[in-house]
Amino acid sequence: MNIDPAQLVKLAITVSVPLLVFALGLRATISDATTLFREFLRPPNRLLRAIVAMNVVVPVVAVAVAMLMNPPFPVKVAMLAMAVAPVPPVLPGKQLKFGGGADYVFGLLVAIAIVSIVLVPLGVDILGRVFGREARFGFVQVAKLVGTTILLPLIAGLAVRQLAPQASASLARWASRIGTILLVAGLVPVLVKVWPAITGLVGNGSVVAIGIVVAAAIVAGHWLGGPDPDDRTTLAIASSMRHPGIALAIGSLNVPDEPRMPAAILLYVLVAAVATTIYGKVRARQQAGPA
């Protein structure tokens, strides 16, 4: 029996993400997951603020940077695709690490995932019109990706916690460990394979262009995060770190003949990961200072 290493890598990544989200669900409550919908249109309007930051401000900045700086084509598409993508499924772990409250962290993940089924296709269509080319990404495609990578595993975790609360903590640890191992095992070969393409995009303004979009996203999330300092940190990180799987699907569907698309999206992810880690540590020190 011949084993295809590429298929093993794909399988590891495919299994790891839902497993990590399942682990997050085991640590959350139904109240956490639904909080932004339950308080919709009540001050401080946290869901509305998040939508404005993530789905209005960041795409506008990405369009402006793409037009004014004119980075390499795959980087331009990657910036625009990431700007309209929802929250990545494993982001709550980072947000909780830097002080985010569980109700807002999980509520934001669920709410943005659901509204993205409408907002992502709309955003892709608008971006296509702005740049004068046909662009599409259907509601069904978004719903399938959001459902399999975020909503279904999260709901499964929430259900297990409701049915077996005492066992959920231990199960969450094991699911998180196994998911992390599989994710690393899957991503390392991918990163090694595309690293030459990533380095080929560095040095021609790509990192600067991506950095401007990421920085603007952090500022927008921080500014629109509301009166709670922890909410500001959470939304700032969510605004700049987006779902790379959905961004890659958008790019691959609309620019199928661009082989550097995965490298451009990974470059964006790396820049955003570094920037949000620095921001998160600064915020953590600021919060610890008064204490």
Image (spheres, grey):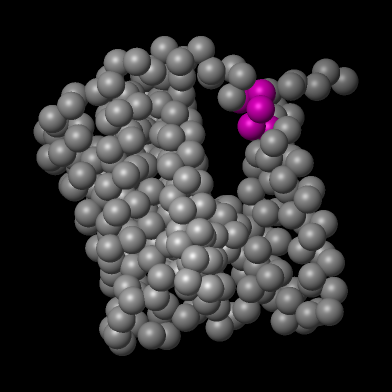
Look at 53% across and 66% down and name the residue there: 288
- Residue 185 at x, y = what percent? 73, 33
Location of residue 184 (image quadrant):
top right
| Front residue of 124 and 99 | 99
Viewed as shown, does residue 163 lie left or right of 76?
Answer: right
Viewed as shown, does residue 120 lie left or right of 31?
Answer: left
Q: Residue furthest front?
A: 290
Q: What span is in magenta?
A: 186-190
Look at 20% across and 32% down and name the residue there: 66
- Residue 255 at x, y = what percent? 33, 26
Compared with 30, 203 (above or below) is: above
Identify the image quadrant of the N terminus: top right
Location of residue 30 (image quadrant):
bottom right
Q: Main secondary structure of the magenta part?
A: helix
- Residue 9 at x, y = what percent? 69, 30
Location of residue 70 (image quadrant):
top left
Compared with 211, 172 (above or below) is: below
Q: Is residue 283 visible?
A: yes
Viewed as shown, does residue 165 lie left or right of 250?
Answer: right
18 part of magenta stretch: no
| Front residue of 49 and 250 | 49
